[in-house]
Each structure stands twice: as structure tokens, then as C-alpha cells.
Image (spheres, rainbow, N blue to C red):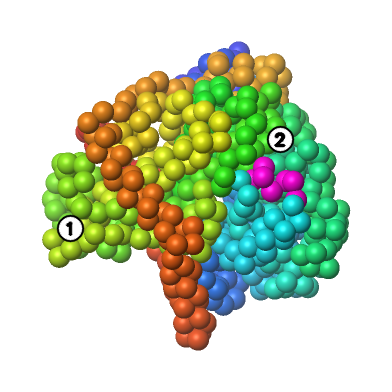
Amino acid sequence: MSQPRAAEAHVVGVDFGTLSGRAVVVRVADGAELGSAVHAYEHAVVDRTLPSTGQPLPPDWALQMPGDWLAVLRTAVPEALAASGVDPSSVIGIGTDFTACTVLPTTADGTPLCDLERFRDRPHAHPKLWKHHAAQPHADRINRLAEDRGEKWLARYGGRISSEWEFAKALQLLEEDPEVYAGTERWVEAADWIIWQLCGTYVRNACTAGYKGIHQDGRYPSREYLAALDPAFETFVEEKLEHPIAQLGERAGSLTAEAAAWTGLPEGIAVAVGNVDAHVTAPAARATEPGQMLAVMGTSTCHVMSSDVLGEVPGMCGVVDGGIVPGLWGYEAGQSGVGDVFGWFVDTAVPAAYADAAAARGLGLHEHLTELAAAQEVGEHGLVALDWHGGNRSVLVDHELSGVVLGQTLATRPEDTYRALLEATAFGTRTIIEAFEGSGVPVTELVVAGGLLRNRFLMQVYADVTRRPLSVIGSDQGPALGSAVFAAVAAGAYPDVHAAAAAMGKVQRAVYVPDEERAARYDALYAEYVRLHDHFGRGGNDVLHRLRAIRRDAVARAGRRETEPQVADVETTSSALVPESGTTTSALTVE
């Protein structure tokens, strides 16, 4: 271990992902990452049975346990600090980010309702993870009513509110478990709850409030609108949601003595206002200028971009003033399933012979399939797929949609379908880019962060399909580094996020550039993707919705729910999937 470097200032960034939390110790002067650690959540994603009772959960549910998040502070932060070799007294601030929208009901003092004995066995008392999609019917009602009433805020979200967000999940809570709703004194984003635990102060962050909480131009949806949804929902904002909102990069408070004991950090250091994992990554990747779209690619992909143009982009997840960096409009869009789709295919649809062949070569199955797929010409597999296995976040904003693979024959092989799924996610990103540009918001560069950037073939596919240069973040811990950047600003080490990003961010520009010949061939495949996209997603054929309804009814009659495979959190197992050398690698990561 190196000697402590007490003369230098350091900050800690903590990234709370879908299956684990990771901490990194960063030097303030240049963003050097000096030590990191990962802690896997004991309960991972609670989507099958409730831990306290074993009762089955319905389809499309996804919960978490707050104690798992606190365990990250108690384990990953001290371990990262020890690995760094720095003197704890040199740490001046801590910043965190979270998956979003992950939201939980609490008492007025921040106690999660699921930690109270009377609510321990109630599913609705637990935090609802971002990938909880069971509130889709409630989101549909929110959207229909807002459209019928001409609510001005709807256009700021591309015309559709997602089932993943605060209001849809809260409306589901009210109507499915009124007793838990009545016991909810605060409806809290996990991004803000963890800050509450660190500094003892509850403050909402401008990012989640704007993107996930329908807070635009200084206000939330009106009481009249909420009452029209459900009379009992009229006072939701003022009674359970409304709270002071702080801007990104501000200081939420000071580290408490209790949190200092958990983390091994000095009491009283700056605690930065909470943030979202994708948005916080933009400064870490130096993707803060207009036109630079950051794609954080993991189990899902979140696309964020700053712009000096305010546009109404169909199907975007939101546009918020200062939502990513101060002084610019921050846009968000996304794809609900990316790495999840690849992981599902490998876990459920690949013959054992492929696993044996990969093992004989010392390769992971993802890597083996990637090599086989990369050997093909564009279009050789004869397939086109829709990347909706986790629903569609953008631009259709419909989580009742499901995946489609078209063109399979008796000659189709696993590597064919695998490549078609890789390409489908690239087509989905192109759809998002074209929606932005069609609304007068230019996209000039694609910057990639997240575990999937290790798959070089996949990155080249994205460059070819989108016809844009791909830059890549120069860090394996993008969100955690981004949180550290904001911690430095909150501690006063830099005057603003732009200055901190310039000094601490890391990026390699134009690592992948489009090949014109392949791009032209992909144009033809993309045209077929668009036809399928519109046919199944824009009302041409409602079969995907009907199939979901049939499945839901069958599962209910059977008295059980279908289990879904867990995707490995390979931030903790990356050595099994990503070799240290080689030209084609593959890995999945959490959002």
C-alpha cells in the first residue's frame, strides 16, 4: 500500500446501481482514481418473492431493501479508502448517485415504511426500483388525462409520463394499498434518501425532481389535475412530495458523526446534493457541451445531453433547466433493456455446446458469441429485432411492449440472433437521436460510458448505425467518478461543475468512427426496424399488448408469477467476462 498523501485533497464518489454499490476515492486535482470497492446487495432485485414472508410478487414488480444501500456505506466506502492509501483527513467531500426513478415511502423522519413492523409484510411499503413497471396502467391514465386537459408540462416529457416515475408509482400505491399510502409521510427518491442518511438533512435534488417528479417552471401538477386522477390523490404533492429543492453541485449538508463512523470519513465534510447515475456521469465523461449525447450503457441505457436549445422531443424522458449542468437545458431519453436483453438471451437461448466451445477456448459466452457474430457481413443473418424485451422507454414510452425477432429460419444460429439483438439496441439509439434532431435539437457526437463499452464490436456497430463518431469515457467507474466531481464542487474545490469536469473528467475522443460501406447496409436494415417499430408500437397492430394481457391473466389464474432470470452484476465478476487483452470483449453492467 502506498503512503498516505495528506497534502492532497480527495473526494469520494458512491454509485448505487441496480445490483450493487461501488465507491471510488478520487484526487481532486486531476481526477485520478486511487482506490475503489464494490459491495453487492444482499437481496439484489426483489422481483419474485417478498423476503419477509416469501409471498410471490405479481408480474412487472421490482423492489429493493434500504438496508442493502446502507451496507454499501459501511463496507464499500471504508474498503475503497483503505485501498487508496490516502489519509482520511484529506477527504473533503462525498457525493452519491442512484438509479432512478427508485422511490420509497417513509415517515417524516426518513424511516422506510418497510422497516416498520406493521408494514414489513406489505410489498407497497418497500422501495420500488426503477425497473418496477407494474404502474403502467396508472401512467396511461396520467397521460390520457394530461392530454385531455392540455397540461402544459406534458410536452416537457415528450408527451408521455413513464410508469417508472414518481407519480405513476405513487398512484399505484394509493389505489392498491391505501393503508400504506396513508402511512406515507414522505415519498422520497432513493437518491435523496441516501443523502438524508449521510447528513441528516432531507433535500430534493433538481435532477430527479425535474425528470422523475414532473417539476417544471417551479411547480408540480396542480391539485385540480391530481383530484381528477383520484380524489384521494389531490393533496399528494403538498402532503408527501413537496420539499425544498437544491441545485446540482450544491452542498446538502455535512457528514454526521454516525455516517462518519459508517464510512471512516471525517465528520463534517461536505455532502453533495443527490443525483442520478446517468446524469452524474456526463461531467465524468466531459460530455457537457451542446450536442454531446452521453449513452450510459448497462442493463439499460440512459441517454443524456445538454443543449442551449429548448425543444419538445417526442418520447423523451424529460428536459430540465440545469438538469445535468448549470446554464444549459438537460435532456434525457433511454432504452429499458440493453445489457438485460443480451444477458437474457445468453441465459435462456444458447445451447450447452456453445458454452462448452467457449470454455474450451477460455472465453466467456458473451465473448464467444460476439466473435462469431463479428465474423458476419451486415445483414448476413437475415434478421431484424425490436429491442423491447424490457418495454420501450423512448420514444414510445410504453412498458407493455415486448421483444420481437423477425426472419428466423431453421438455419438461424444463436450468433445470428445475438447479433440481431446487438443491432436492435443500436437501432433503438438511432431512433432516439433522430427524434432529437427532428425536433431541432442537434446531436453531433455520441459518448459512451458503462460496462458495455468494453465490447468493441458492439461499439463499432453503434458508430456505423448512428453514423456518428463514438467517444468513450476514460474510466471504469463513470457514475462514481461523476459523483466525486460533484463532491469536489460541493466542497468548494472548484467554482462550478464545468471547471471540475475539465480537470477531473476523462474521455477518449472518436475512438470509433463510422464505416461508410457498413453504414449504408445498416441503413437498409434500419428502415425495416422503423417499419416494425411503427407497426407494433404506434397502433398498427396491438398484438404485443394483447399478449401481455393474456399472459397476465394466465399467471393470475395459475396463482404464481413467471420468474425472470437475474442478470449478473459483472462489476463484481468482470474478470469472468472481460479478459485483460483481446480485440473483442463483452461485459454487462448495472444501470
Residue 286 left/right relative to 412: right
Q: Is residue 154 magenta?
A: yes
Residue 31 left/right relative to 204: left
Residue tagged 2: 273
Note whether residue 565 is visible: yes
Near-viewer residue (62 or 218): 218
Number of residues whose C-alpha sits closer than 10 Å to that of mark 1, classed few (under 14), some (14–19) or many (20 or more): few
Residue 178 left/right relative to 71: right
Span colored in magenta: 151-157
The disc labelled 1 sits on which kind of residue? Arg
Q: Is residue 354 magenta?
A: no
Residue 239 in picture, x, y percent from top left? 86, 56
Residue 472 in picture, x, y percent from top left? 40, 28
Say which mark, if any, is on residue 367: none
Q: Secondary structure at mark 1?
A: loop
Q: Residue furthest front?
A: 540
Could you tell me which residue is drawn at 51 percent across and 48 percent down?
Answer: 395
Total marks placed: 2
Most common secondary structure along the magenta stretch: helix
Could you tell me which residue is drawn at 55 percent across and 15 percent down?
Answer: 503
Residue 75 left/right relative to 193: left
Between circles 1 and 2, the one closer to the viewer is: 1
